[in-house]
Amino acid sequence: RRPTDIYPRFKAQGADVMGGRLIPLGDDRYKVTGTFLQIETDEGVSGIGPAGTGATAFYIDTQFKPLLIGQDPMAIELLWDQMYRNAIHGRKGDNMMAISSIDIALWDLKGKFLGQPVYKLLGGPVQDKIPAYASALGSSIEPEKAKERVKEFIRQGYTATKWFFREGPTDGPEGVRKNIELMKALREAAGEDMKIMIDCWSSWDVPYTLKMADLLAEYRPFWFEEPVLADLPQSYARLRATCPVTIAGAEHEYTRWGCKMLMDMGAMDVYQV
């Protein structure tokens, strides 16, 4: 469920997210496009970073490129601060994503220049492995097809999966029923041990989230991700204090200062930064 789905004309468009279509069940090859940034130096070393959307690429090319040409690519902190101060009217969203894209490319460049993997430059490893989950973004949420997708994830060795629920507060009792049916199907396919996370796409509200926590309790959702709009930290704090399901978020908070504010408020259990 996308945030715009509270409006019928957007809800009617469907939930296709991968190139305007759902990924057919069983497909292991499908077209995905992306935009990347490459920073080149006069010494022949280059760095690559993800440029995300066309809007992000626009900001890179028009706002930040002039600040970077001729500068020392090793001075990553200095360049970040100069870009951030230049983006006085763009503290969130595509502007900050553009800065992040450049930052990633600069770290990639620095790692190549020094002959070291970036994780070592950032302090080195702190553990040998980390858990991974299978995102079902783009998969059908029709219960029987969702079951097959979960079984496919299990065959691939995943122990956790995240699903994107389409129904919310404006969809009435029918929407509630569909959410319950989907969660029930996921749990039946996943078994007792697999973790099932729900991404709410910032389209629920506090009462609805608490209601779904109660109605889905027997199927043990592992977390609710971004149940409300990112601009409502007080709502997140209220949910964390009252909701029995783990609350995840902060994907749409773009700076360390914003994340610290959320942490100081105790707004979430899991910070996706």
Image (cartoon, rainbow, N blue to C red):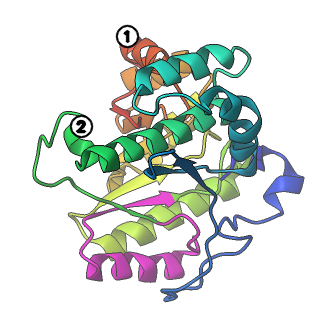
Kind of element beneath mark 2: helix
Number of numbered callouts drawn = 2
User: In this rendering, would 62 be left or right of 226?
Assistant: right
* Magenta run includes residue 185: no
Which picture quadrant has residue 195?
bottom left
At a point 65% along the width and 26% down the height, the residue shown is 67
At a point 39% along the width and 47% down the height, the residue shown is 108
The reply to whether residue 6 is visible in this rendering is yes
Which is closer to the viewer, label 1 or label 2?
2
The one nearer the camera, 259 or 173, is 259
The one nearer the camera, 109 or 119, is 109
10 Å crowding of disc 2: few (<14), some (14-19), many (20+): few
* Magenta run includes residue 139: yes
10 Å crowding of disc 1: few (<14), some (14-19), many (20+): few
Q: Does residue 22 lie above or below 250 as drawn? A: below
User: In 3D space, how far apart are the residues under numbered discs 1 and 2 (Cα atoms)?
Assistant: 29 Å
Image location (x, y in percent) of residue 208: 58, 37
The one nearer the camera, 199 or 192, is 199
Bounds of the magenta span?
136-163
Q: Does residue 171 lie above or below 76 as drawn? A: below
At a point 51% along the width and 66% down the height, the residue shown is 182
Residue at the outermost bottom position: 26
Q: Amino acid at mark 2?
A: Leu
- The residue indicated by pointer 2 is 121
Q: Earlier in the sequence, mark 1 or mark 2?
A: 2
Q: Does residue 174 lie above or below 158 as drawn? A: above
The reply to whether residue 3 is visible in this rendering is no
- The residue indicated by pointer 1 is 264
Kind of element beneath mark 1: helix
